[in-house]
Image: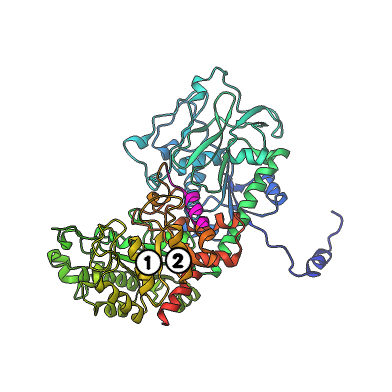
Amino acid sequence: MNNFNIQSYLDPIYAAYPEAERQPIIGITGNYADGDLTLREKYYQQVIAAGATPIVIPPIADKNTIINILDHIDGLILSGGADFNPLWSGEEPCQGLGHINAQRDLPELLITRLAYNRQIPMLGICRGMQTLAMALGGRVTQDINTCTAQPSPLTSHPSPLTSHLSPLTSRFSASKKNSQSATPPIRHNQDARQSELTHSVNIRRDSILYDIYGEEKIYVNSFHHQAVADGGKSFRITAHAADGVVEGMESTEYKAILGVQWHPEWLESGLPIFQWLVDQARQFSTAKHIHHRIITLDTHCDTPMFFHQGIRFDQRDPRILVDLHKMTEGHQSSVIMAAYLPQPKIGEQFSSLVKPPAPLTSQLSPLNSPLSTLPSQLTPFSYANAIFDHIEDIVRKNSQYISIARTPADLYEDKRKGRKSIMLAIENALALDHQLQNVKHFAQRGVVYMTLCHNGDNDICDSAKGCNTHNGVSQFGEKVIQQMNQQGIMVDLSHAGEKSFYDALDISQTPIVCSHSSCRALCDHPRNLTDDQMRALAQAGGVMQVTLYHGFLRQEGEATILDALAHLEHAIKVMGIDHVGLGTDFDGDGGVRGLADSSEMIQFTLHLLHRKYSLRDIEKIWGANWLRVMTQVQNH
């Protein structure tokens, strides 16, 4: 450098607008030694070469520091370094354990778990891949030369590091090839310079690494004596060295998470891995901006079913799939919570099928107080009111962050003020207690839709799982639908039998909805809609919200987010883009691998972006279609 005139460097910046292109922000965990935060320049040079802006993350376990960093980055690199203290895995140290870096361990385990919750794309390099495994349910061999991987402590005593993991994910384990392979152990800690290729890696064809390199065998450098022994439920192993040592792994949950055991930052052939991360971070940044702009509405969750357990909506409660933490992590703005009422069979008492909500405060509503001590007095009407009392109590306790919305305008006002929204619904019009005037009561409480029945015929209509009691909608049911039209409550026909569906279409003067249904053409279940039903629904101006209950998505094997997208795209093909949406059925057995709770809702948007949906179409799917119908119904 022979020019030390700062203005000559500023002039080109000032000469154009904007001064710089918007780039994804990639956080890189820094190393720690002798009181200094350090990072090899190769890490940030590769990030810059890949088209992103790097920042170095200090090893600090303070929650405010970590969470504010995560709120401002679009991708995360977990860098290499010294060994982990094996006590974090519930293991004792073996003889081959090397130098541990206690200053890094907790901060990196925390940031990994919290980034995972937030769906932030991640790349783990060497120690960083081991960080992914340790933080998310896998195991690490302390020394591949002298130590045998210890039996997993998860078999009898689940570690607090892994207790979050979803039972919806499939387990993928690394084989113990390093002890069984005919290939002798190879050297994994080279003396050659960092850019020297010293051994081969075999890559699975059905993997991110194969997509990046297009090769089943590549050559890499190697600077490690520890390795991942088991990817756990969150990862599948996708690359091995010739001696069976794990060299690569990726998410089993369709998330942008990749780990490699070598150091690509030193290699010319390493740039594509960083480009992969930057591409994922760019998409994630786009998805975050979309969620910031639009209403993201889940039209059906059953979280109130867990109220009797004393769940905490203001905590990240592992018993439920929807809470304030998870909605925030998934960038979800609003949800419709249903008061679900089971349909009693002949001879059953409704009060024997439900439990009243556990009170949040000592100041209970008149309905809630006696119900807590006298469950035998519960009627469908009083139970539904007790659920709504409890939701209102939750909102009062968290009014800075959440509100009850009654109209589309309320949703937009809440979004403007930075609050989440809950809307109220009834799943099973049994809640009316056969009293027509109760339709008005629930309208005044703010109920936006009522599912006419559940799994069994009631006094209003026949269910998809009923016995054709009325041959469709009953005479009383016709009056209920008419009253719902007058009171501005949407008529929901999820769970209704096919004859009930067509009857309701004829009776209702406003468009009807199916708040959580899927396509019978793809999964032959009576709860799903036929193509003819879907066409009739669209012609009447209604909407169908694809649901995430696995039994409605596929009949054999495990349902995943890809199945949900297949149902969505079939519905779009049959009905058009203006008549579809998403109703997860979270906490009512809904949730699939890749879209297992509210924290993963932004993954749905990422998949839509990958499939080239426009911003306008994504907005329609996420709620604009539903809100169009809601506006029509409420203004009728």
Q: Which residue lies under the disc numbered 1?
A: 502
Indicate whether 137 appears above or below 107.
above
Q: Is residue 228 magenta?
A: no
Query: Viewed as shown, does residue 555 lie left or right of 23?
Result: left
Residue 338 appearing in the image? yes
Question: Which residue is pictured at 70% across the width and 53% down the height?
Answer: 51
Tags 1 and 2 touching, CB below 8 Å: yes
Query: Viewed as shown, does residue 63 lie left or right of 241?
Result: left
Question: Which residue is pictured at 63% across the width and 56% down the height?
Answer: 282
> What is the quadrant of the C terminus in the image?
bottom left
| Amino acid type, callout 1 | Tyr
Specify the label residue 536 is tagged with.
2
- The crowding category of the residue bearing disc 2, from other C-alpha atoms within 10 Å (few below 14, some 14 to 19, many at least 20), is some
* Boundaries of the magenta span: 558-570
- How far apart marks 1 and 2 lie (CA) works out to 8 Å
Q: Is residue 561 magenta?
A: yes
| Amino acid type, callout 2 | Ala
Indicate whether 201 appears above or below 629.
above
Tell me the SS state at disc 1.
helix
**295 or 511, which is in the foreground?**
511
